Image: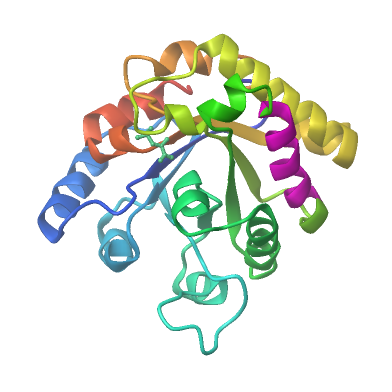
């Protein structure tokens, strides 16, 4: 990595209970996070208040796992970016592959959510990634370019954006991308940004990798030139493992 501060996100997904969240927060607070690494934890909405009150804000910031596409209003069950900003949550994950696949979020929706969240003052972790079928069928670059293009079309200011490359075949499967596979895609995503947004923006942009990252495979990935951090699912639920992943960026 060589592009601005190393960034590690912990995506807790729809996991946890009052008891397990308390344990995880205690484990995280007991860990040491290198100064040069920015760490963001993303609990389910219902635990955000507790985590905000108890997680050491010197070491960890917070992210929501999703937000609504527009402002407050008659959108039952949703939470707006404005509400997140008002509550003091600085980041939101958008376009996670689970939301694309299970909730029907299209590239266009993810682009519009991203620009709305940025306008509300949030930082955005925007997720892209191909399925195994798309990779094996030769559609990978078309898919990734379309996902990136939808972001480029909507986002004006990229200073508070982190792009997460998360190949769907690597998420929650234990099949991590090789450092070479991840580096190849990250370099290509950065080149795409350089072409559409200019070299200065592309150079500063954090492109993080997600998909079965753990405390054993993170170090090798972190050495890659264009891997500027991680988005971690399963391993972010184990305090000591997650702390080790954060330390791999130092
Ligand atoms: C994720 O959900 O963003 C993720 C990368 O999950 P896992 O680390 O469990 O593969």
Q: Quadrant of ligand 1?
A: top left
Asked if the stretch drawn in magenta spans residue 142, the answer is yes
Res. 183 image quadrant: top right
Residue 143 screen position, x and y as percent: 69, 36
**Which span is picked out in magenta?**
140-152
Side (left or right) of 105 relative to 63: right
| Relative horizontal placement of residue 157, taking residue 227 as reference (left or right) | right
Q: Quadrant of residue 108?
A: bottom right
What is the tally of numbered marks visible in this picture?
Answer: 0
Residue depicted at x 42% and y 55% = 62
Q: Residue furthest left?
A: 19
User: In the image, residue 142 lies at what x, y percent?
Assistant: 74, 33
Asked if residue 11 shows in the view, the reply is yes
Question: Which residue is depicted at the point 14% across and 47% down?
Answer: 23
* Residue 28 pos. (x, y %): 26, 41
Question: Is residue 250 rendered to the left or right of residue 238?
Answer: right
From the viewer's side, name the closer residue of 135 and 220: 135
Task: Please name the residue shown 44% across and 73% down the image.
Answer: 87
Q: Please say which color scheme the image uses.
A: rainbow
Please identify the quadrant where the N terminus is shown. top right
Q: Is residue 105 above or below residue 26?
A: below
117 or 57, which is in the foreground? 117
Magenta region's main secondary structure?
helix
129, above or below 127, in the image: above
Regarding residue 2, the answer to whether it shows in the image is no
Please say if 186 is above or below 81. above
Residue 14 placement (x, y as % from top left): 29, 54
């Amino acid at each position: 990595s060589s592009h601005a501060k190393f960034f590690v996100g912990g995506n807790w997904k729809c996991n946890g209970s009052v008891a397990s969240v308390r344990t995880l927060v205690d484990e995280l607070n007991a860990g040491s996070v290198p100064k040069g690494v920015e760490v963001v934890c993303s609990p389910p909405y219902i635990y955000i208040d507790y985590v905000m009150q108890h997680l050491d804000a010197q070491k960890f910031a917070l992210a929501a796992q999703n937000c609504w596409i527009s402002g407050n209003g008659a959108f039952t069950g949703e939470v707006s970016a404005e509400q997140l900003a008002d509550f003091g949550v600085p980041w939101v994950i958008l376009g996670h592959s689970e939301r694309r696949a299970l909730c029907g979020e299209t590239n266009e929706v993810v682009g519009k959510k991203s620009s709305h969240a940025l306008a509300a003052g949030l930082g955005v972790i925007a997720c892209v990634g191909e399925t195994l079928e798309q990779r094996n069928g030769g559609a990978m670059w078309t898919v990734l370019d379309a996902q990136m293009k939808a972001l480029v079309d909507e986002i004006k200011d990229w200073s508070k954006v982190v792009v997460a490359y998360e190949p769907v075949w690597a998420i929650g499967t234990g099949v991590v991308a090789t450092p070479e596979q991840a580096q190849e895609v990250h370099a290509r995503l950065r080149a795409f940004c350089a072409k559409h947004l200019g070299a200065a923006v592309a150079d500063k942009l954090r492109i993080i990798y997600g998909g079965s990252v753990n405390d054993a495979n993170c170090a090798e990935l972190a050495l890659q030139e264009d891997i500027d951090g991680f988005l971690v699912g399963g391993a972010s639920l184990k305090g000591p493992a997650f702390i080790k992943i954060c330390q791999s960026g130092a």
